[in-house]
Amino acid sequence: QVQLVESGGGLVQAGGSLRLSCAVSASIFSCSTMGWYRQAPGKQREMVAVMPSSGTSTYADSVKGRFTISRDNVKNTVYLQMNSLKPEDTAVYYCNGYCRWVDYWGQGTQVTVSS
């Protein structure tokens, strides 16, 4: 069983920045893919950024150039640096990990961007 715990959400003005963190209870090397997803009210959950254990990360078109996913293998933590935030980025952000052939999700952290 792998637990994912997000932190770092909050309220920020448009144009501001936030960094989300996802602490992984197991070795991050056991996860072939780590990613961030988000769900706005009344909308389906959507992919924001996905980072494979090796290779190039993938970003949603709406966040390219503004968001960056990264990982710290020593701390077993995945980050999402969010810059130039827009009101349409307001959503609950979820950390996802595909670890040992099982999909895991965190509980989510709220990000609210005011105009």
Image (cartoon, grey):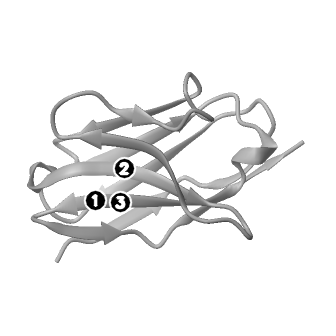
Q: Please say if 59 is above or below 43.
A: above
| Viewer-closest of 73 and 34 | 34
Between disc 1 and disc 2, whose residue precedes?
Answer: 2
Residue carrying label 3: 96
Circles 1 and 2: CB atoms closer than 8 Å:
yes
Q: Could you tell me which residue is drawn at 46 percent across and 41 percent down? A: 80
Circle 1 Cα neighbour tier, 10 Å, few/some/many (<14 / 14–19 / ≥20): many
**In the rendering, which numbered label is found on residue 97?**
1
Image check: 107 left or right of 13?
Answer: left
Residue 14 lies left or right of residue 84; in this view the side is right
Q: CA distance from mark 2 to mark 3?
A: 5 Å
**How many angstroms separate mark 1 from mark 3 (CA)?**
4 Å
Marks 1/3 in contact by CB < 8 Å: the verdict is yes
Q: Are marks 2 and 3 in contact (CB under 8 Å)?
A: yes
Write the residue at 80% across / 45% down: 87
Amino acid type at image mark 2: Gly
Residue 13, image quadrant:
top right
N-terminal label among 2 and 3 = 2
Q: Residues within 10 Å of mark 2 (few under 14, many from 20)?
A: many
In the image, residue 92 above or below residue 84: below
Quarter containing the C terminus: top right
Which type of secondary structure does the marked residue at label 1 adopt? strand
- Residue that carries the numbered disc 2 in the rendered image: 35
Rendering coords of residue 20 (x, y %): 50, 48
Confirm whether residue 76 shows in the render: no
Horizontal and vertical percent position of residue 37? 49, 55
Determine the CA span between mark 1 and mark 2.
6 Å
